[in-house]
Image: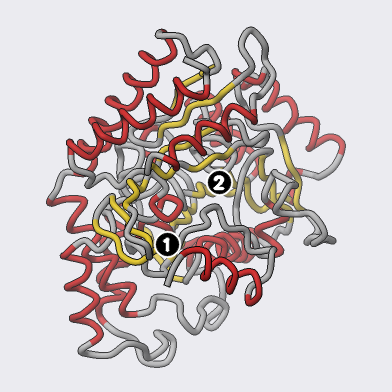
Amino acid sequence: MNNADLQQRKEQATPRGVGVMCQFYASRAKNAELWDVEGKRYIDFAAGIAVLNTGHCHPKLVAAVQGQMEKFSHTAYQIVPYESYVQLAERINRLTPGTHAKKTAFFTTGAEAVENAIKIARAATRRSAVIAFTGGFHGRTMMGMALTGKVVPYKVGFGPFPADVYHAPFPCALHGVSIEHSLQALQTLFKADVDPARVAAIILEPVQGEGGFYMAPPAFMRALRALCDQHGILLIADEVQTGFARTGKMFAMEHYDVLPDLMTMAKSLAGGMPLSAVCGRAEIMDAPLPGGLGGTYGGNPVAIASALAVLDVIEDERLLDRAVELGGKLRQRLHSVREAGVPQIAEVRGPGAMVAAEFFRPGTQTPDVDFTKLVQTRAMEKGLLLLTCGTYGNVIRFLFPLTIEDALMDEALDILEGALRSAAGL
């Protein structure tokens, strides 16, 4: 078996709409390393798109999954419940920001969590409208696409989308969008398009994921909270990508001094098992009638077991501190490379280990997509997997497992520096 043969079979058997970055095929993986079917090793700075904060095949997760499989693999929680679902809900309720009474429901994917958060918000407020932001990504379902603030490739050819979804610009100083501009746009929205008394929720990522790792300024988050309180609107924090230690906190909302009403989470929640959740104020979570929430695979017991192990690993291995340490090391290297003669690096940003580098053509404010792709290609040739993101595709986001060994991190940073210098012609 080789990569070329598998690629040919893939082209014949699967649709082009499922975009695939790599043309090699995984054989095995361990922590932050992955080997293809031909035996080539890669350092994984993609981590299944932020899913593997605890790395590939962590022994505690493997043991938890194996142990659950020896008991039962599925009952459908709505038919025959099990204690582990309740136990994980209790832990999530304690770990999420705020000491108020909370409840948590489990689903399968991040998009499914977002869909259910909107359902819960509508049931609780008896309103229908929802406001999201440009650059935000909330999934590939119909409601997820409607909320997502990026057309290509997520929305092209798939409309019409659900009604009563509105967008406002997300504040981003690098691209000339101030907090005041974003807040004024919301006021304009209320004057021109939707009565705030009809708005059920405002949803945003505290740090935009696919949008480019732009962090919502604290003043903006406080203003949103005040706006929501003024009009009886619920604030939903989409923490699908930011959750579970990536930002140096268990959840990104811990970087702020305000609380959301609802939070969505997925990705690193279960370390690779399909599991998502909505956690929120108890009275809001109880708004839907019995049977209004659920799903055949929602809260699958194998995924729940893995998630409980993830929380243990984050605590036992001090991954919150590790995220801050590793993110600092990466930012320092990127800054030194820029100073050494790679002017395409326009900005290095992000809390904890949720770090990104954005690239402009030197001396301009023009996104440099070609340079970004070249860095990604050169890094992959040397065995380092990197993901791009951003509205213009000119951002590289770094999503290494927080469990990565120091020596492997140093090796990856050397490869990254070499790729940046090579792309810059140094």
Residue 84, image x, y percentages? 26, 76
Q: Nearer the viewer, mark 1 or mark 2?
A: 2
| Foreground of the two, 36 or 256 | 36
Q: Toward the viewer: 373 or 278?
A: 373
> Considering the numbered disc 2 on the image, is that residue within a helix, a strand or a loop?
strand
The residue at the point 62 percent across, 45 percent down is 202
Give the quadrant of the N terminus. Answer: bottom left
Residue 230 point in image, percent of width and height: 62, 37
Residue of label 1: 282
Q: Measure the alpha-carbon separation of dots 1 and 2.
A: 15 Å
**Residue with the mark numbered 2:** 235
What is the three-letter code of the residue carrying label 1?
Answer: Ala
Instruction: Say left or right for 301 vs 180.
Output: left
Q: Say which residue appears at 55% left-offset and 46% top-offset.
A: 235
The spot of residue 234 in percent (x, y) is 58, 49
Q: Quadrant of residue 60?
A: bottom left
How packed is label 1: few (under 14 Cα within 10 Å), some, or many (20 or more)? Answer: some
Crowding around mark 2 (Cα neighbors within 10 Å: few <14, some 14 to 19, many 20+) is many
**Of 64 and 299, the residue lying toward us:** 64
Residue 58 to residue 348: above or below: below
The residue positioned 41% from the left and 8% from the top of the image is 339
Residue 152: x and y in percent read: 73, 47
